[in-house]
Amino acid sequence: MPVLPEAMPRLLLLFWLATTTAAASAASGFQLSSNCPPSFKKTDEGSCELRSLYQFYGSVQNKGLGGTQTALPEHRDGFSPEQIDLGRYLFFDPALSGDGTVSCASCHHPDQGFSDGRARSVGIGGRELSRAAPSLWNVAFQKRLFWDARAQSLEEQAQGPLYAADEMGNTPPQLLATLGGNPVYVELFRQAYPQGELEEISLGQVYRALAAFQSSLISLNSRYDRYAHGYHAALTTKEIEGMNVFRSFVARCAECHTPPLFTNQQIAVIGAPEPEGLPLDVGAEKILNAPKLKGGFKVPSLRNIAQTAPYMHSGRFETLREAVGFYNQGRGHAVPEGVDMHLHWHIWDPNLTDYEMDRVVDFLRTLTDESLKPQIPGQVPSGLTPINHKNDAAIVTIETTNIGESS
Ligand code: HEC
Ligand code: HEC
């Protein structure tokens, strides 16, 4: 490694690092995968299409809430394998942040259910955000993104963290300069977007590749799913008891957390508490300018929920048992005094017993499936440490299915 010139401005330094390491990277051969990730099929046009048993259930859709054999909502797919793989490098590369210290994976770590294990995420310069990082499993089924549903597509969503001063702190010109100044990225973008006449990397291509990678984060093969597909021995008696409580019109969980994604994708006001000392987060009220949605948040999917503590937009609950217990403590018990909140009608007083709540937790644990967890790249084109965080500088290599190893 050449000697670092002193007092080099940050941007230049990044650029310099990127270009000097690039020659080495090119020699070590970054090559995008031409295979679709597992559970995707490559079409004749060369794009990846999701294949899931749930696609056979279209005909019995709408046959009752909480039904096991219910069709999935539409999934965002149609990306090429190369775009998915390019997105994987971008997702793990801290070069996408303003100072090269934060990647998407800093807050959405594959080993933490694509969340970060924190009540509220920490961005560039160690700044704490006001909300928890949601899991990204099955995110390509979501019609609207963010807790308050303020983004309509994954492409729109990505611009939030990239340019937020307290998340990745980048700017569009700096992002383009970093990627365009790195010969490895220039080559990888050319592989991912071969028909583009454009000489230069565009922001649209960056957002699309990130969306492509996220579309491959599929979790639909949990023990619950095996049960849903007809293999009854996949769940224990206690787990089935929990499922029945979850689906019952007493607990009403499935009214909002509707299978198979365990969300109906609506915004609901449930009145979950903010952490001690933090002001009320009005959620969707602000975005949709609708006072009735004060404290309203998108119903989160409960897939891989056992991996993503702490819970709720505020990270207020440490355990699943606490989160389940919240629904049983009296309608509106945590709404601050004097605040007018229009709680959803399915939030009420179900009077579940401790036994029933414990079984619901047992059931929620059956929604875990990380079999398609993508591999964290051993190195990324910038030469920086993949993932990276002030608390997490280590490269973690996971011995699971390599993205692109099968199709
Ligand atoms: C500093 C931490 C941090 C970083 C870095 C970060 N995120 Fe997030 N992400 C969050 C938080 C917190 C939220 C929820 C914010 C909200 O709802 O207001 C979120 C929300 C999301 C969502 C919405 C999920 C849903 O179900 O609605 C997606 C998708 C996402 N991030 C993808 C990304 C991508 C792609 C990157 C990199 C370009 C990235 N994030 C970088 C913390 C982070
Ligand atoms: C009226 C719709 C509704 C009903 C009914 C409902 N939930 Fe929720 N659930 C939500 C919303 C909205 C959130 C996010 C609220 C927030 O962050 O403030 C949530 C959050 C959660 C979370 C935390 C998810 C995460 O990623 O942090 C869990 C666990 C959960 N619900 C389980 C349940 C269980 C178990 C039941 C039944 C006892 C239930 N829910 C009933 C709407 C509902």
Image (cartoon, rainbow, N blue to C red):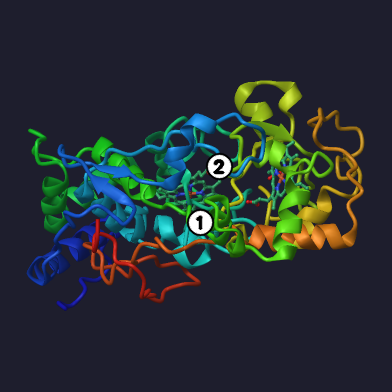
| Residue 390 appearing in the image | yes
When the figure is inspected, residue 149 is found, relative to residue 52, above or below; the finding is above
Quadrant for residue 184, please give it.
bottom left
Name the residue nearer the viewer: 396 or 9: 396
Decide: few, some or many residues near mark 1? Use Cα within 10 Å; few <14, some 14-19, many ≥20. many
Q: Residue at x 66, y 47 (%)?
A: 313
* Residue type at numbered disc 1: Gly
Which mark is in front, 2 or 1? Answer: 2
Position of 360 relative to 211 (above/below): below
Q: Secondary structure at mark 2?
A: loop
Determine if the C-beta at disc 1 is less than 8 A from ligand 1: yes
The residue closer to the viewer here, 323 or 155, is 323
Where residue 158 appears, as percent x and y from the top left, is 40, 42
Drawn side of residue 39 relative to residue 338, left or right: left
- Indicate left or right for 234 with 188 as reference: right
Q: Position of residue 377 (x, y in %)?
A: 29, 67
Quarter of the image where ligand 2 sits: top right
Q: Which of disc 1 and disc 2 is earlier in sequence? A: 2
Look at mark 2 in the image and give the residue it sits on.
69
The answer to whether residue 320 of the structure is visible from this angle is: no
Identify the amino acid type marked 2: Gln
Which residue is found at the position 42% from the left and 39% from the top? 55
Q: Which residue has dot 1 on it?
A: 123
